[in-house]
Every structure is written in C-alpha cells, then in structure tokens.
Image (spheres, grey):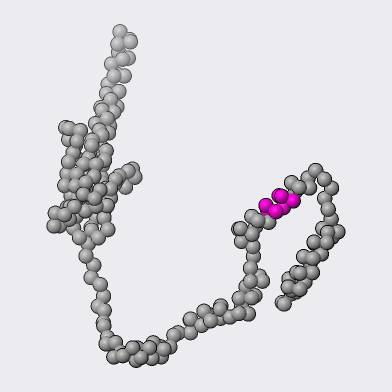
Amino acid sequence: MKIRHTIIPLILLLMPFMGMSQDEAENDKVIQFTGVVLDEDSASIPGVHIYTPVFGRGTSTNQYGFFSMPALEGDSLVISAVGFKKATYVVPKIKTNTLKVIFKLESDQEMLNEVQVYNMPPTVEAFKQAVLAVRLPSDFDNVNRNLDPATLQEMYRTLPADGSMNHRWFVQQQAFYDQTKNSVRINPLLSPMSWVEIFRAIKRGDFTNNN
C-alpha cells in the first residue's frame, strides 16, 4: 500500500513533463518545404535566399525560381533577393510531411536624385581646352610630391624587406647552415668574395647616412 501511494503522486508529477515532451516532439516535426518564387509579373526569380535567421540554415532558388529545403513546423523564414523587398513566412503545422508554396516578391524601387545634363563644347579642340582649364583642388598635389624622383629614391632606401625577401634570406641562412654544420665555419672577413661585396656596397652608398 505504501508503494502504491508513492507511485501515484509520482505519476501525477511526471504527467505535465510527459505532455511537454510530446509537444516538443510535435514541434520538431521535419517537413520537406518546396516552392517557387515569382515577381509581380509572375516571372521566376533566380538567386532568392530562403533561410531561418535563428538557426542559420536555408537555400537559394535555381534558375527557374524553384527551391527545396527541410524545415521545422513553426520556423520563421526570410525570403530576400536583390532588388526586391524582404518577406517573412512562418511554416504552419500540417498533417503531411511535404509543403508546397508560391511566393511573390514586390520590387524595391528607389528614386534617384535629379541629374542635370549640360551641353558639351561644340568641337574636340574646345573640349580639350575646357578639360585643360579645369583647376584641380590642392588635395591632388600629393600625387606630384609622391612621384618626385628624390622622394622615390628615399622611399627605396628606407623600404623594409617584404615577405619574399625575408623568406629568401631565411633559405640562404638555412642552406649555409646545412653546408657548414659538419665542418669549421669560415670567417666572412677572410673570404675574398665578402670583401668584394663590401667594396660594392661602399660604391653604391649603402653605408651613407643622409640624415
């Protein structure tokens, strides 16, 4: 009797949770969601995105405006395409496992500002003179300054090594290490080729400091 009195209250406590699990199972029903997306003239729209922002899943229409994707009952879908207004659709609860729909999107029109068109010069020579007479703002003077030969030389001397130069230097050091790891390393000051490179660097002015 004690066991019976214990089981009955326990069952009564678990019944609400059992009902909630059944509702969740029903809400998680997966259906095959297919359809076609058309414009206001009933023409198919390719490249339309149909997705759920919450779960991040979706698909796009093919060249005929057709799409097919799995969806859950109660999913809130967003239908968007360039040049059309966004639309939303909530997947309803159905008895079957397939759902077919037809979406119609409204075009998103935007009015542009007024453009004034002026008469061009009557001849080619007059057009050239008008172009040459245009005074550019002072902000474009930095182009001439950056293209100055002295500025380019200074940038070349102070330009740091890029990725390819660093990689080439590393490979050379690695190759030199592999060549001399089993022998006595040669002092660079005792190598005639090293002195040749030093003289060439002096002639080029690599060691001069203009600053």
Image: 207 above or below 9: below
Q: Is residue 22 magenta?
A: no
Q: Residue at x 41, y 89 (%)?
A: 132
Instruction: Please state the horizontal and vertical placement of residue 14, each as a whole percent of the image.
Output: 30, 23
- In percent of width and height, residue 105 lies at 19, 55
Tell me, yes or no, whether the highlighted magenta stretch contains residue 173.
yes
Q: Is residue 142 left or right of residue 30?
A: right
The quadrant of the rendering that contains the N terminus is: top left
In the rendered image, the residue lying farthest to the top is 1
Foreground residue, 171 or 137? 171
153 on left or right of 100: right
Up the image or down, 88 lies above or below 69; here it is below
Image mark count: 0
Q: Is residue 16 visible?
A: no
Instruction: Identify which residue is drawn at 18% across, 38% down.
Output: 99
Instruction: Tell me if residue 121 comes above or below residue 192 in the rendering.
Output: below
Residue 167 visible somewhere in the drawing: yes
The quadrant the C terminus occupies is bottom right
Q: Main secondary structure of the magenta part?
A: helix
Where residue 89 sits: x, y (%)? 21, 47
| Residue stretch in magenta | 170-176
- The extreme left residue here reads 41
Residue drawn at x 31%, y 15% as measured from the top left: 7
Relative to 4, is 153 on the left or the right? right
Quarter of the image where one finds residue 35: top left
- Residue 40: quadrant of the picture: bottom left
Seen as rendered, the residue at the extreme right is 190
Percent coordinates x, y for residue 32 in the rendering: 23, 37
- Comparing 121 with 39, the one in front is 121
Q: Residue at x 17, y 32 (%)?
A: 96
